[in-house]
Image: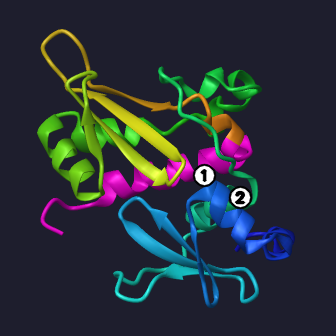
Amino acid sequence: MIHKALWEKLESLDPAEVCSRTGACKSSNGFVLPVLNTRFIVDPAAEVFTPAPGEQQRKPNFLLELSGVQYLINARMAPLGEELVSAEQFDGGGIYFRGPHAVPTQQLVERFGKCTSEFGLVAHSLGGNRVSFGDEAWTLDLFPRLPVTVVLWGRDEEFPARASVLFDPTAGQQMPLDALLAGTNFLVKELAAKSIDT
């Protein structure tokens, strides 16, 4: 459950302005926010973050709620950059994204390190677009103005499997680092948990 002050902050903002800078849409009970390939209703008055009607229903997820509400509060319109960066390259990221706050790439290695093609199927099912890095790499729109690129190198005779999570340089402007980590954790868990036959 996220802090009530975040809901109050979101509720105090002009809905039209929020939609203009975030890519969300206004609804009768808050906002419709695309997350990967699912639409969510974010209702600050009721403090609810739930799949929109017609979407597969799921349990509330703290990582998604925290990052989604922070995205709606903080995101801004900014042209995407021409290069990708690691989380450590953001202001303060070199200190923050360490130890327990490190980007959880090991989950991706454990799930897909022996079969990178399965990773491609899962990423595609979540609305990703393939890009040319590593053995398999996909860019997924975590939120409308926050693309995340996941790169996977499969295990071979010489090297163990490894994975990287890369961001557009503007990602550090879209939300605080703790919320960016929460959103990244949510994305990694979605990738690692999703079955290719769903």
**Residue stretch in magenta:** 174-198
Residue 71 position, x and y percent, is: 66, 56
- Are dots 2 and 1 in contact, CB under 8 Å? yes
- Residue bearing the label numbered 1: 182
At 69% from the left edge and 48% from the top edge, which residue is drawn?
76
Are there few (<14), some (14-19), or many (20+) residues within 10 Å of tag 1?
Answer: many
Q: Say which amino acid is labelled 1.
A: Ala
Q: Position of residue 83 (x, y in %)?
A: 48, 20
Task: Identify the mark nearer the N-term, 2 or 1.
Answer: 2
Nearer the observer, 104 or 30 = 30
Residue 108 sits inside the magenta stretch:
no
In which quadrant is the N terminus drawn? bottom right
Residue type at the position of mark 2: Gln
Q: Residues within 10 Å of mark 2 (few under 14, many from 20)?
A: many
Give the image's coloring scheme: rainbow
Q: Whole-Å distance between the Cαs marked 2 and 1?
A: 10 Å
* Residue found at x 62% / y 90%: 28
* Up-down relation of residue 76 to residue 173 (above or below): below
- Observer able to see residue 112: yes
Q: Is residue 180 within the magenta segment? A: yes
The residue where tag 2 is placed is 70
Does 177 sit above or below residue 83? Answer: below
Between tags 2 and 1, which lies in front?
A: 2
Quick check: 186 above or below 97? below
Q: Position of residue 165 (x, y in %)?
A: 44, 33
Q: Main secondary structure of the magenta part?
A: helix
Residue sitting at the far top: 158
Residue 140, how many percent across, how many down?
38, 46
Q: Quadrant of residue 106?
A: top left
Can you say whether 173 is above or below 179 in the image? above
